Image (cartoon, coloured by chain):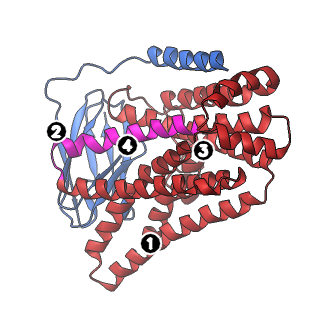
Chain colours: A red, B blue
Amino acid sequence: MGAAFLITLREAFEAALLLGLVYTYLDKIHAREQFHWVTLGGVLGLVASVAMGVAVGFLSGPLLDLGPDLIGATVVFLAVILLTWHAWWMQQHSRGIRGQIEERIDRARTTQRLWIVGLIAFTGVFREGAETVVFLWGIMAEATSVAGWGSLLAGVAGVATAALLGWAIFHGGKSLSLPTFFTITTVLILFLAAGLFSTGLGRLQSLGVLPMMAPLWDTSWLLSDRSVVGSFLAGLVGYRARPSLIEVTGYIAYLVGAGYLVLGGALHPAPSARAAREPAASRSR
Amino acid sequence: MRYRGATAVALLIAWLALVPGPATPADAPPEITLTIENNRFTPEEIKVKAGVAFVLVVVNKDKAAEEFESKDLRIEKVIPGGKTIRLKVPALKAGSYSFVGEYHEKTAKGRIIAE
């Protein structure tokens, strides 16, 4: 019963975190009327998860062997690209524009294509969504006994707790100042995306696209990634107890590369920010 | 900013190019069957040859779904109840690789030993 709660909490944690962050982002830039993008993305992610959960029940053969893995790997890399893009935008708005807070908000609203945050919501929900659906479906099949129903309730409670966590982020984020919120979110997103990037590389290793290698180090004696803390750190910053060389270099390369891309302009903000802003402003929706 | 983006992409591509590609697969990789029944794996210990890719045929005889998960192998794969999945496992270096059934972690666990 406790296990079911932890499993769904763990699976839904990342989705709740991302949804909380993008809803807060829209609230911060006074674009609540754009909430529908996030809601739509989240709902579509849920629909896709259910569809995929049902599909794996019907599929068989090579389609079942490989299909979900390929979709999974694609979604991971798509999420990395979207998150990097979003972090880059936030930095442009928090740093480049030197005017009043209202001006920053105005810029953010007119220049960022806000459907991107909807796509972030979609990938966030869809990434672990299908697994959660299959899991809950499975315990529903077992739910003939009292213990079975208890597990189902615990599983649902896990998702609900994750949602509550997302709501807490939304609530807490509202009280932060705009630049503080943008900075914290940017750093959080960069670490999260770095973790996703190395997860994606690990998937490519297991698919045989990249070579398998022995772990570079083993910290499972200190913090196993199967433990509660370890698995949350895995979702948040991509912690691995036994990472491979490819995952470690990929993680660092992403952090350095994306960090340079997103935060590097802080050294000479004026010219680069203006250059990036003007072509973007002319494309505004 | 454009140039910086291009530099980052170029670095990424250069890095990916440095990583060697997959080895050419053997004609017919050996198959090993792993059965899930009553939320347990049989056998719980699988011995394979190091350096030889193989196919793990996971048969789920239970009604409930199980997720074959191995952090060591970077595999996370849901097997719906009553289904069979063929997992291609790349050639492994000698060592022990643990796996669990994530949905029934207390009982469903095992390891692959490559030697």
Residue picked out by circle 1: A156
Where residue B22 sits, quadrant-wise, is top left
User: Looking at the image, which residue is at 43% across and 70% down?
Assistant: A155
Q: Chain of mark 2?
A: B
- Quarter of the N terminus of chain B within the rendering: top right
Mark 2 vs mark 4: in front: 4
- Secondary structure at numbered mark 3: helix
Mark 3 vs mark 4: in front: 4
Task: Sort mark 1 into few (<14), some (14-19) or many (20+) by Cα contacts within 10 Å.
Answer: some
Which of the numbered marks, if any, corresponds to residue A72?
A: 4
Kindly check if marks 2 and 4 are in contact, taking CB atoms under 8 A apart as contact: no
Where residue A98 sits, quadrant-wise, is top right
Earlier residue among tags 3 and 4: 4
Q: Where are the magenta residues, as a range?
A: A59-84
**Please, what is the dominant secondary structure of the magenta stretch?**
helix
- Secondary structure at numbered mark 2: strand
Residue picked out by circle 2: B31
Residue picked out by circle 3: A237
User: Looking at the image, which residue is at 72% across and 33% down?
Assistant: A92
Give the x, y percent position of residue A140: 30, 73
The span from disc 1 to disc 3 (Cα, nearest Å) is 25 Å
